[in-house]
Image (cartoon, rainbow, N blue to C red):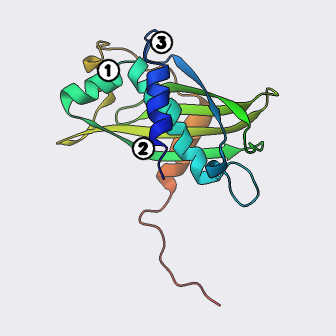
Amino acid sequence: MYPVIRLFWQLWRHRNDPPLPVTGTHVSHHTCLPWDIDLWRELNNGRTLTLYDLGRIPLAGRVGLIAVLRRERWGLTMAGASVRYRRRVRMFDRIEMRSRLLSWDARFMYLEQSMWRRDGECANHILYRAAMTGREGIVPPADVLDALGHPGLAAPPLPGWVRAWIEADAARPWPPMQDPIEE
């Protein structure tokens, strides 16, 4: 089940936080609860993606994006993701989540989020490709930035690892191969 109560808690908790610049970092704190774990008593990999919403949506609020989405009647969709898991998060562990927009190109915005354990170790890290959508399809990031009050804002340079991911993902076959598995 989607953690609606936790999402509303995060939105309420950060409702008076100061606005962030477009590429500012939103920091939030979360606890791994019993319904977040898998059979090995660790944070479930699918739940990790859901918990990242609890940082990404308040980030969108703090940079002004939620108000723009409502005003323009646009949607927000994730168009790709790559996760790296490195350290365990166990039941009742507290984590710090860091969420920020890295950059954008002609079609997409690229965000990164990470979860940090109390011992200072990064537990996992995700790169998202996000798109704003309207009646005509994908809304160009330049139009989104204009609506946010940042017309002509230049995109920060994409880190090399993000450019490599974009190139690798572009080479990926679509639709995926549907050949039968040979025995």
Residue farthest to the left? 135
Q: Is residue 90 above or below residue 69?
A: below
Residue farthest to the right? 119
Residue type, label 1: Leu
**Could you tell me how far apart the alpha carbons at marks 3 and 2 are, in whole angstroms?**
25 Å
- Quarter of the figure with residue 149: top left
Question: Closer to the camera: disc 3 or disc 2?
Answer: 3
Q: Work out which quarter of the rendered image holds the C terminus and state it.
A: bottom right
Q: Secondary structure at mark 1?
A: helix
Depth check, front residue: 54 or 76: 54
Residue at x 50%, y 54% (from the top left corner): 171
Query: Which callout, 1 or 3, points at the residue further toward the start of the chain?
Result: 3
Q: Is residue 14 above or below residue 179?
A: above
Position of 106 with respect to 85 (left or right) is left
Q: Is residue 39 visible?
A: yes
Badge 1 local density, few (<14 within 10 Å), some, or many (20+)? some
Q: Secondary structure at mark 2?
A: strand
Residue type, label 2: Met
Position in image of residue 178 (x %, y %): 47, 77
Badge 3 local density, few (<14 within 10 Å), some, or many (20+)? few
Position in image of residue 87 (x %, y %): 78, 42
Depth check, front residue: 64 or 118: 118
Position in image of residue 175 (x %, y %): 41, 66
Which residue position is annotated with label 2?
78
Residue type, label 3: Asp
Q: Secondary structure at mark 3?
A: loop
Position in image of residue 96 (x %, y %): 66, 27
Which residue position is annotated with label 3?
17
Query: Which callout, 1 or 2, points at the residue further toward the start of the chain?
Result: 2
